[in-house]
Image: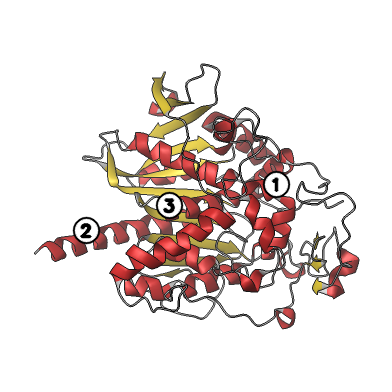
Amino acid sequence: MIPLFVMIMTNKHKTRPDTFSRWLLFIMLASLTLSIPATAQEAEGDTFPPPGSTGNAANVPHIGGRDPGGNPVRLARKTGHVSNYDESKVKPYVLPNPLKMADGRVVDSATRWSDERRNEILSFYETQIYGRVPNNTPNIQWQAQPNGEDGEKRIEGRIGDQPDGPKIGLTLHLPNEVEGPVPVLLNLSFFSSEAAQARFLQRSTRNNDRPRFDQRAAVLQHGWAFAQIGYGDIQPDRADHWREGVIGQTLSENQERPAADEWGTISAWAWGASRVIDYLETVEAIDRKRIALTGASRLGKTSLWAAAKDSRIAAVLSVVPGEMGASLIRRDWGETLDDMAQNFHWQFAGNLQNWVGKWEALPIDQHMLISLIAPRAVYVNGGLSDQWSDPKGEFLAMVAAGPVYRLLGAGDLGTDKLPELDQPIISKSLAFHYHSKGHHSVPEDWQLFLEFADKHFAATEKSKGASKE
C-alpha cells in the first residue's frame, strides 16, 4: 500500500499549501486510488529484493510516509529501491554524450545533429520511453461553439468519425487592441474546462483568504493569446483505460492495450497538443511562428515531449516536470524511473519496464530530451519544497543540454552552478527558476517566461533575417 503525495515540505520551510498546490493534489488523488496495486507488469507470485536494497536504506522505516526532512518516501518493489534525499548517497554517474553517435562518431555540425544524431535519440524515446504514435490515428474535426463570457471562443474537436466519440474542448482568448497576428500560449490543463477550473479555484481562494493568480489575464495583458485544453479529453489518466480516448480509437477489435513500443498517455496528450496546434494555425489572429506550450507536473513532461516531436512549438514553459521530464534519471534523488514504471506505467511505453533498475545502461538521459528541442526556447522551474521532483536534477539536465544548444548557435544556460532560491537564470534560449515554493509555478514564472520567449522570438527572426542577407 503506497499512499500518494504531491506536496513535499521540508522542516525548514513548512508552509500551508497554496491554492494551486491543493488543486493539483486533488486532481492527482482523484485520478488514482490511495493504494497502488501491483502493476500489470508484475506477475502474481513474483519475489522482490528486500526494501533498501537500492536507494537510501535509512529511509526504510519511513516507507509510505515522510523522512525527517518532510520528503515523501516510496518503495519501488522490483528493485527494493527506497527514496533518497541525501547527497552523500547519490552514486556517481556518467551522462551519455548527446553529441556522440551510437557508433562512436562525433557530432560536429548542425547538419549531422539534425540529420543523424537527433533522429537516433528521438527514436529511442519513441520506442522505449514515451511510446511511438501508431499510423492509424484518427482525424479531428473542429467546429466552433457558442462563445463564452469575456470573448472566450469555444471550439470542439471531435476525435474520429463516431458521433459519440471523444471530444476535445478548446477555449481561445485573444488580447484586446493588439494589431497583427499575436503569439499564443497553449495551456495543457488538468481541468476539463476553464469554467470548472475557475469554480474550483474560487472555492479554494475563499478557503485560503488569498487572491489567486490569474494566468490567463497575465498572458492577455502581455499581448499574447491564451488557449487551453483539458488533458482528459484526449486520453484518461488511468491504468487499463486503453479502450477509451484517442488510444482506444487505434486499437484493433481484439487488442487490449498498445504494443510495447507504442504510446502511453504522455504521448497521447502530446499528440493532442499538436492537433490543437493544427487548428491554431488556421486562426488568422495567431502568429503560427510564435506558438508556445505549457503544462505542470505530468503535463510539464508532456510539454517537453510534445516540443521534441513538433518543431512548430517555438517555446516551452515546463512547470515542475520532475522525473522522466527534466530531472536526470541517473541522479538518485526523490522520484525515480523505478517509481514511475511502477506507479504510473500507463503514461509510458510498455518497454519502459525493461529499464527498471538499469538507469546506467540507458543510452539517453533527460538532458537529451531538452536537447531535442534545441535551438528553441525552454523554461523549466522547480520548487524548494518539491524535492520529490528533484529541482537540482532539472537544473543539471538544463546544463548538460548546453553543448547541443551551443552547436546550433543558441547558447547554453550560462552557468553550471545551482542558483540561489528565487534567482532565475535567463539566457538566450534556456531558462531555469528554482523558487522557494512547491510543486507549481509562481506568478513570476509567467511574466519571466513571456519576456524570455519574446526575446527569443525576436532574436530568432533577426538571425533568420541576417542569414538571408
The local crowd at label 1, few if under 14, some if 14 to 19, many if 20 or more residues have their Cα within 10 Å, is some
Say whether residue 211 is left or right of residue 60.
left
Q: Which quadrant would residue 238 be assigned to in this image?
A: top right
Tell me the mark number nearer the camera, choosing from 1 and 3: 3
Helix, strand or loop under label 1: helix
The local crowd at label 3, few if under 14, some if 14 to 19, many if 20 or more residues have their Cα within 10 Å, is some
Q: Residue at label 1?
A: 25
**Amino acid tagged 2:** Glu
Closer to the chain start, of discs 3 and 2, is 3
Q: Position of residue 466 (x, y in %)?
A: 14, 65
Mark 3–mark 2 distance (CA, rounded to whole Å): 22 Å
Closer to the chain start, of discs 1 and 2, is 1
Q: Residue at label 2?
A: 461
Q: Residue at label 3?
A: 309
**Amino acid tagged 1:** Leu
Mark 1–mark 3 distance (CA, rounded to whole Å): 29 Å
Q: Position of residue 169 (x, y in %)?
A: 49, 29
Disc number for residue 463: none
Q: Position of residue 394 (x, y in %)?
A: 56, 67
